[in-house]
C-alpha cells in the first residue's frame, strides 16, 4: 500500500473562514477535501488552490443539515485514511428575538451548528485515534461567552461547541489527537447576511478580516492552545475564567442543598 499524503477536510469551505482555512492548509502541504453547498464556488476555489499550490483538492457538495447528504461526508471521514485534520467551520447565525421567530429556522441553525459538527467529529475520531495523530478544529464564537438578548439560540449553539470541545479534550488527554476550539469575534464574512444584524453597524475596530482571523487561529493551534479567543489580549484572562469555573465544581453536586435554600 502506498503512503498517501495527509489530507485536511474543511466544511463551509466556499466562503469566509472556510476558504481561508483551505488556502492556508494547502500552503502547509495538505491535500484538501472541501465541503459546502455551493458547487460553483467550491470548483473555483479548488481550481485556484490546485494551480497555486499543486495540492490535490476534492470537493463534496453537501447540505450538512440533510441526513442523506451528511452521511456521504461521514462515510468519507470514516474511510479515508489520509485524513489528518477536520475543520468544523460550517455554521450559520440568526440573531433575532425569539418572540415571533420562526422555529423551523432555528431548528435548522441547531442542526448545522450543533448536530452536523457533532456527527462529523464522531465520524472522524476513530480513524484519527487509530492512526495515532490528527487534529479537529471546532469553530465556536465569542458569542459563546458574550450572551445577548438576540443570541439565545446562536449563543447556545456556540456554547455547545465550546463545551463539547472541552469535554473531548479531556477524553483525548492521553491521545495524540488534538482538539481546538476557536472563538472569533465579528469577522467580515457572509455569515452576517440574513442574520438579522448588519455588520456595517459595528465600529470598524470590532471587525476582524478573514485572513487575520484564520492566521491567528492557526497560530493558536501551533502554540497548543486548547481554546483560542482571537482578539483576547491576555490568554491569562481566559485561564482565570476557567479556574473560576473549576472552583465551582466540588460544590455542584452535594447530598444536601446549600444552606440558603434550607429553612
Image: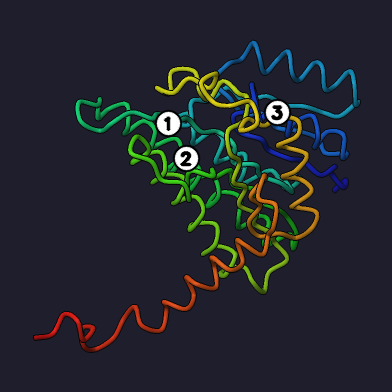
Which element type, helix, strand or loop, lies under badge 1? loop
Which element type, helix, strand or loop, lies under badge 2? helix
Is there a contact, CB below 8 Å, between mark 2 and mark 1? yes
Q: Residue visible at 66% across and 35% down?
A: 10
Q: Residue visible at 16% across and 80% down?
A: 261
Is there a contact, CB below 8 Å, between mark 1 and mark 3? no
Percent across and percent down for residue 63 are 48, 25
Rendered view: 201 above or below 3: above
Residue that carries the numbered disc 2 in the rendered image: 116
Earlier in the chain: of badge 1 and badge 3, it is 1
Residue that carries the numbered disc 3 in the rendered image: 209
Q: Residues within 10 Å of mark 3 (few under 14, many from 20)?
A: few
**Res. 14 image quadrant:** top right
Earlier in the chain: of badge 3 and badge 2, it is 2
Q: Is residue 203 left or right of residue 152?
A: right
- Between 226 and 1, the one lying in front of the other is 226
Percent across and percent down for residue 143 are 48, 43
Residue that carries the numbered disc 1 in the rendered image: 65
Q: Residues within 10 Å of mark 2 (few under 14, many from 20)?
A: many
Q: Residues within 10 Å of mark 1 (few under 14, many from 20)?
A: some
Amino acid at each position: 500500500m502506498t503512503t498517501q499524503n495527509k489530507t485536511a477536510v474543511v466544511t463551509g469551505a466556499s466562503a469566509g473562514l472556510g476558504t481561508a482555512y483551505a488556502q492556508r492548509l494547502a500552503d502547509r502541504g495538505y491535500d484538501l477535501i472541501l465541503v459546502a453547498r455551493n458547487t460553483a464556488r467550491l470548483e473555483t476555489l479548488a481550481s485556484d488552490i490546485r494551480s497555486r499550490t499543486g495540492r490535490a483538492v476534492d470537493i463534496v457538495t453537501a447540505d450538512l443539515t440533510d441526513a442523506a447528504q451528511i452521511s456521504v461526508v461521514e462515510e468519507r471521514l470514516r474511510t479515508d485514511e489520509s485524513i489528518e485534520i477536520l475543520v468544523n467551520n460550517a455554521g450559520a447565525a440568526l440573531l433575532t428575538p425569539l418572540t415571533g421567530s420562526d422555529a423551523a429556522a432555528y431548528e435548522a441553525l441547531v442542526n448545522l451548528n450543533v448536530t452536523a459538527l457533532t456527527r462529523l467529529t464522531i465520524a472522524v475520531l476513530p480513524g484519527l485515534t487509530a492512526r495515532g495523530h490528527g487534529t479537529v478544529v471546532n469553530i465556536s464564537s465569542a458569542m459563546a461567552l458574550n450572551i445577548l438578548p438576540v443570541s439565545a439560540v446562536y449563543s447556545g449553539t456556540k456554547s455547545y461547541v465550546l463545551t463539547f470541545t472541552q469535554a473531548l479534550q479531556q477524553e483525548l488527554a492521553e491521545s495524540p489527537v488534538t482538539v481546538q476550539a476557536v472563538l472569533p469575534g465579528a469577522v467580515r464574512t457572509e455569515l452576517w447576511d440574513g442574520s438579522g444584524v448588519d455588520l456595517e453597524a459595528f465600529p470598524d475596530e470590532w471587525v476582524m478580516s478573514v485572513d487575520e482571523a484564520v492566521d491567528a487561529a492557526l497560530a493558536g493551534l501551533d502554540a497548543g492552545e486548547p481554546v483560542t479567543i482571537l482578539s483576547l489580549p491576555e490568554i491569562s484572562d481566559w485561564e482565570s475564567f476557567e479556574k473560576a469555573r473549576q472552583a465551582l465544581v466540588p460544590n455542584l453536586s452535594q447530598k444536601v442543598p446549600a444552606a440558603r435554600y434550607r429553612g
